[in-house]
Image (tube, rainbow, N blue to C red):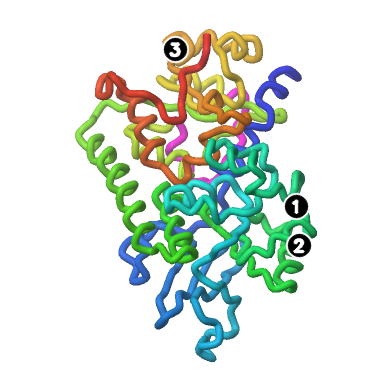
Amino acid sequence: MKKWKILFGTVFLIFIFLFSCKNSTREAVTGKSNGIEYASHLKLDKAGDYTIIEVMEPWAKAGNYKYVAGKNKKKLPDSLKQYPFIQVPVNNLVVTSTTHLPALSLLGEEDKLKGFPNTKYISSDTFMEKLRKNQIKEIGNGAGLNTEETLLLKPDVIVAFSSGRDQKQYEFFEKHGIPVLYNADWMESSPLGRAEWIKLFGVLFGKEKKAQQKFDEIAENYNLIKEKIQSIKEKPLVFQGGFFAGKWYVPGGKSYAVQLIKDAGGRYIWEEDTHNGSIPVSYENVLIKLPQADIWLNPGSILSKTALKQAFPEVIKMKSYRKDQIYTYALMKGKNGGLIYFEESAARPDKVLRDLYHIFYPEETPDYHFHYYSILLP
């Protein structure tokens, strides 16, 4: 049992936290007057020459945060002076999550990134090359930012991923004149809602039209696949999740991960569940449910059937194991060892959906090459 715990390791924990766990109960919305169609934690409202940015609940029970982005603070109307001001277009910024990096690439603004913590998790070749050339500064390799190194960069803005535990540090930067803009993309339950946060970076770089264009392309690709599955009656039964720290964890039936499964044409084995985060399930329940599944997704950090059999001997009885229908994103890594899925997938749910559609209906895409997923090694 100890071997099993170790094998699933950190990768599965990160997956649980970033891609399944979500405590907000907001639903995705469509047709908002501010141009946001799917994201439920972001508003972008034009007020003359300024954009009012509102981020709702960047972490559970956080409340809402408002900012004003514009070119000239001196002409700011009195009604907007109460909010933190972000000078745009931004020429020098710090971001704190690899999930923020794809938006910079999609908008052609990679050169504006000057600092990043925990750079070992970056998988993008472009950003890794900039790190090698010292064009991006390592500003922390632990839980927080290196305050001295960050201040020396004098960023126009820090785009922050936060769970609420690091507020004091971010308040420190604000007191030194650096606006901290919380990014709540990870709180979205809609795959397209997460991708729509590219529009926030469009505002920061003065590229709202390009951000809209890129998002429209992603949404069109995503919805085309959803349309394909409408006429399919026989859908595969899918199990997702694995064992970590003494317990089995699976995505709740209303989670982001399960929405992807449904949109790709799969039936989630716990689809009647009403949780929108990850949930622990008993070992006995797994032994009842897992054998029924046609496909098993993301069995933690285990990369081969051999390792899976050693850690979980009962797996030999499972249909998904016997028919080589176990898939993982843990095999697709950047040169630095970072998982490409963790960095890119939130910004490109259309690519994730294509992968899942091929897994569920391989006969429909016989010459397909995966973006993120791989079949488990022998």
Look at mark 1 in the image and give the residue it sits on: 144
Please report contact status of discs 2 and 1: CB closer than 8 Å, yes or no: yes
Give the structural element (helix, strand or loop) at label 3.
Answer: loop
Residue 336 % position (x, y): 63, 31
Q: Quadrant of residue 267?
A: top left
Q: Is residue 40 visible?
A: no
The structure residue drawn at horizontal position 26% and vertical position 19%, both measured from the top left corner, is 363
Magenta range is: 269-284
Q: Of residues 113 and 41, which is closer to you in this image?
A: 113
The structure residue drawn at horizontal position 28% and vertical position 47%, both measured from the top left corner, is 220
Give the structural element (helix, strand or loop) at label 2.
Answer: helix
Q: Quadrant of residue 222?
A: top left
Please report contact status of discs 1 and 3: CB closer than 8 Å, yes or no: no
- Horizontally, residue 346 falls left or right of residue 216, namely right
Q: Which mark is residue 324?
A: 3
Nearest to the eye among marks 1 and 3: give it: 1
Q: Dot 2: few (<14), some (14–19), or many (≥20) neighbours within 10 Å?
A: few
Q: Of residues 113 and 194, which is closer to you in this image?
A: 113
- 279 drawn magenta: yes
Between discs 2 and 1, the one toward the N terminus: 1
Q: CA distance from mark 2 to mark 1?
A: 8 Å
Q: Amino acid at mark 3?
A: Asp
What type of secondary structure mainly makes up the magenta span?
Answer: loop
Nearest to the eye among marks 2 and 3: give it: 2
Look at mark 2 in the image and give the residue it sits on: 169
